[in-house]
Image (cartoon, coloured by chain):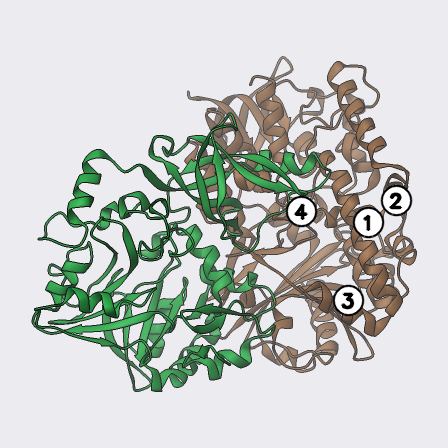
Chain colours: A green, B brown
Amino acid sequence: MSLRTTPFHPRTGPLSEGQAWRRWAGYVVASSYELSHEREYHAIRNSAALFDVSPLYKYLVTGKDAARLLDHVVTRNVAKARVGQVLYTPWCDNEGKQIDDGTISVLGDQTYRMTSADPTLRWLHLNASGLDVKIQDVSESTAALSLQGPCSREILQLAAERDLASLKYFRLTSAKIRGIPVTISRTGYTGDLGYEVWVDAAQAVPLWDALAETGAPYGITPAGMLALDVARIEAGLLLIEVDYFSSRHALIESQKSSPLELGLGWTIATDKERYNGQAALDAERKRGPAWQFTGLTVDWDSLEQLYADVGLPPRLPSQAWRTSVPIYDRGGRKQLGYATSGGWSPLLKRYMALAHLGSEHAKPGTEVRMEVTVEHRRRQAKAHVTALPFFNPERKRA
Amino acid sequence: MKQYDAIVIGGGHNGLVTAAYLARAGKSVLVLERQPRVGGAAVTEEIFPGFKFTMFSYVVSLLRPEIIRDLDLPRHGLHILPLESTVTPMENGDYLVAWGDHDETRRELYRHSPRDAEAYDEYGRLMHFMAQAVKPIIGMVPPDPTSFAPGDLAGLLKLGKHFRGLGGERLHALVKLMTMSSADFLDEWFETDVLKATKSASGIIGTFLGPRSPGTAYVLLHHYMGELDGVFRAWGFAKGGTGAVSESIASAARSFGAEIRCDAGVSKVLVRNGRATGVVLENGDELRAKTVVSSLDPRRTFLQLLESSDLPSDFVQDIKRFKFRGSSGKVNLALDSLPSFTCMPGVGRQHRGAFSISPSLDYVERAYDDAKYGEFSRRPYMDIVFPSMIDPAMAPPGKHVMSIFVQYAPYKLNGGWTDAKREAFGDAVVNTVESFAPGFKSKILHRQVITPLDIEKITGLSEGNIFAGELALHQLFFLRPAPGWAKFATPVHGFYQAGSGTHPGGGIMGASGRLAAMRILKDGA
């Protein structure tokens, strides 16, 4: 196989019933293990789903100036974060356009782990000149599992033989699972109660076994990217290369977005010294971003009617789609923006989409039209702007 | 004294749906439930410590998607999980399975009959059209074919157009479904006996009929109409059991301002000058409302809550003729571990779906023979699911609950139901399962046996009929529950009916409750 497999592949490989794999950062990970991703999706919301998220890029940043470097790169305030905290953050180029987004875990005094979707080593080095800091690419040596769902805490508590009730949302702790040293962070990409477990790649397989065995009575279910994609849309979490393009990959200016345009204004610290993109972001904040990233709910009756017009029952996208779809005003003529992800929420019984809309049209409740293809013809379904996230259970933070 | 816009009698799912829609429209609404909890026959109870039983109804399919959306039930905790497969163990040790994956199912069927494997697709396509054909009927207030009122005529016209639009072939199929027995209907399509047996079983549920009795083909269709995410014939299991469905509707109703009072049985509806003015509770309290809605079955709605002098005598006669004839029982078990079935040994994905004990048409018909003469089936038809395999929170980790729907258990048992007869019925059920899954009995930690008499006592459903009145052809659409009174109004002004005993009735569907609310709002209550 020319693409790499992850350290969990000895376990995930045989589980794949239909050999459906997806590429992720030069690795292959399961699209779904069963023939349909349906049960894997429901495990996220009903019991516990186990994802292999090893392909994430991971960097260990240490040294006296580690916080200074990270603070220069990302928009969140890293210096203020305490040991045991995890920050979700975007980072920008000097024009305030988003390069990538990821997390920064404060593992210890002057010790940080940064995750990213794209390789970031060169960018970190470029920003580190003159700083007393060590940057290690630990992408291959660190494996990671994500355990998401209402039963995830119980399973991890049993596996780690300790109480995790005090581990709050976006906090981490070190622990041992069957003697294997791990870091457990209360993070994930599903908008549910969930954790990510970080481990030395050499110990990946025994960690998988420990979680799979402990979780069996709780209905733990290995799950792939198709299930994750539906859950992350419900959670209103954006995906690079789908919902936005890295400013470093964009070929034209209009392909770039700022965090303010992506609904990430809350991640931009106002209490720290100079960082990449600061001036541009300050100016943009003052004049107001041109775009907003928001949810859309497609009106059922409208969609049903479009299909009824040709004598069909509505066809629903049970797999999330990742294409650009035009959004029009209620008259159906003027284009207001475009949706970049969408799909049917089996939980909410709603057809949802994530969209970029001109700021003046992005107020929740605004009626718009979304293009849908019904029997080879372009039609428009009524939709309403919906505040994100679509699904936000109490247990996520409780 | 506070006067409500509407009082809804009965906090089952239909009563709650009516209340939620009325409250959503800004009405002040009070729901009165006799039991300590809402839900009626859709309740989940922890009968044995740590084990949650879906006491009566146990699966969800028919719940109308528009209700889920209108009331935003997922935000109130509703989560419907897929129930993918059905395994039918055969008496020779073989099996027939319908898996979630279409191709896999067809290959399985091919093993039994290559001919049937091909017919299966065509049959599925026809049933899809049939479900589509009756779908608009479910959502409409039944027009009275004997009336010349503009509303009725418009309804009949719409219906006529709809049926004409079906075209000859499909209309003929529909007429067949309306008149044939499920066995005969399936005979036209398939040769594999076990396939016909397991399919015909959905035609007998809740009826006092066998698979060879005419009229059962319609019930088969009724169960085909279940629609999840735009797909017909999709069955699901509600996280937390069917009680969670009721709780979510109750929560939605409360969020719209409805008040729900449990332990508040109603003894009478107050009627003055032909108009309902309120209710009297079992404790003697009187409550006033402009509109009173009963979600109880027709017998209790008209013969118990009202004086017969409040109603026209021919109507009273019609209601007295309305047939209930409860024929199903339920056995709920707490298990130490999952049973292994001879036909498919071990524990696996088969336990995440249903097991249908319907090995042959003769087996199911014989089960009916026992009931016809007043006995419970010695070897009954059973629909088995393991809710804890779908929602692990239903039982302690590693332990399981098993829900067994059983037919037949006639309400009018020879000599009447006694505690001893109930246990004998439970034994018949457990012994039959044991014959397909040896060693199963030793895994039982606790057993709950529910007879039709128990259903009646606990939920109030007359004669323990799970559909609040048989789903027989003469009791459907504009005849449900009585000719001339199928449009949710009653002969008493301001008094409405909203339960499963009205159109379209049956299953956790909520359509009756929704249509009743629409009618009440239209009447300007």
Can residue B37 be seen here? The reply is no
Labels 2, 3: one chain: yes
Q: Say which residue label 3 marks.
A: B106
Nearer to us in this view, B315 or A51: A51
Residue at the (66%, 20%) spot, across then down: B492
Marks 4 and 1, how far apart in space? 23 Å
The span from disc 3 to disc 4 (Cα, nearest Å) is 28 Å
> Where B248 sits versus B258, above or below?
below
Chain containing the residue with disc 1: B
Instruction: Write down the residue under mark 4.
Output: B507
Given the image, on which type of amino acid does mark 1 rest? Leu
Whether label 2 touches label 4, CB < 8 Å: no
**Neighbour tally class for label 1: few under 14, some 14-19, many 20 plus, Cα within 10 Å:** some
Which of discs 4 and 1 lies nearer the camera? The answer is: 1
**Front-lying residue, B77 or A353:** A353
Secondary element at tag 1: helix
Residue type for callout 4: Gly
Q: Which mark is residue A153?
A: none
Which badge, 2 or 4, is on the more N-terminal residue? Answer: 2
- The mark nearer the N terminus, 2 or 3, is 3
